[in-house]
Amino acid sequence: MFRRTLLSLVAVAALAAGGNAWAQAPAADIVDTAVGAGQFKTLAAALGAAGLVQTLKGAGPFTVFAPTDAAFAKLPAGTVEDLLKPENKAKLTAVLTYHVVSGKVMSAALAGKVTDAATVQGQTVKIDASKGGVMVNNAKVVTADVQASNGVIHVIDTVLLPK
């Protein structure tokens, strides 16, 4: 009897929470969320080589424009391998931090706007959400608002390169 009552209470709580009690669990951090998606192996390797994994597992909040493996594959042949060399760590760090904005910026806050956003790297990216989609410089946001415990990920189709 106790067990049936407990299960009923859990079911009622799940319905009150929107019908899915598992959806209420806190999301993983940005790094674990990206790794779990399976399409960011190159990004994960680059974050490791640059020593940025612990930073992006930190409190944040961060907004990350995350290029997919396909985005990295669009770079000229040998570019990724060159960036991953230990002697190019500073350059790799600059490229990666150019994809990160401090704070949590959801796509709804950008809808219909064209704006510049300061990156952690120090330069700005142009965000254009005025034409039905969202562009970050020359990269298209293909999936927006992927929630993480310490920020948000916007998946992009092109690697952003600082000037």
Image (cartoon, rainbow, N blue to C red):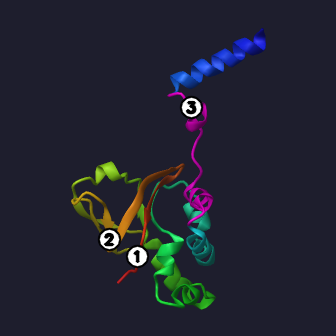
Q: CA distance from mark 1 to mark 3?
A: 37 Å
Q: CA distance from mark 2 to mark 1?
A: 9 Å
Give the magenta-colored segment's residue range: 18-39
The residue that mark 1 highlights is 160
Amino acid beneath label 1: Leu
Of the residues tagged 1 and 3, which is closer to the observer? 3
Identified at 21% across, 59% down, the residue is 130
Neighbor class of circle 1 (other Cα within 10 Å; few <14, some 14-19, many 20+) is many
| Secondary structure state at the residue bearing disc 2 | strand
Amino acid bearing label 2? Val
What x and y, as percent, mark residue 35?
61, 62
Which x, y percent locates residue 95?
46, 78
Q: Does the segment drawn in magenta span residue 29?
A: yes
Q: Circle 3: is it few (<14), some (14-19), or many (20+) Cα within 10 Å?
A: few
Say which quarter of the image contains residue 131.
Answer: bottom left
Q: For numbered disc 1, what is the local secondary structure?
A: loop
Crowdedness of circle 2 by 10 Å Cα count: few (<14), some, many (20+)? Answer: many
Let me know if residue 105 is in the magenta part. no
Query: In terms of secondary structure, where does tag 3 sit?
Result: loop
Q: Which residue is mark 2?
A: 125
Which is closer to the viewer, label 2 or label 1? Answer: 1
Residue at (52% x, 81% y) in the render: 92
Image quarter of residue 6 = top right
Give me the disc on residue 20: 3
C-beta proximity under 8 Å, tags 2 and 3: no
Q: Is residue 4 left or right of residue 150?
A: right
- Provide residue 133's location: percent of width, then percent of height: 29, 59
82 relative to 154 in the view: left or right: right
Dot placed on the residue nearer the N-terminal end, 2 or 3: 3
Distance between the alpha carbons at the discs numbered 2 and 3? 37 Å
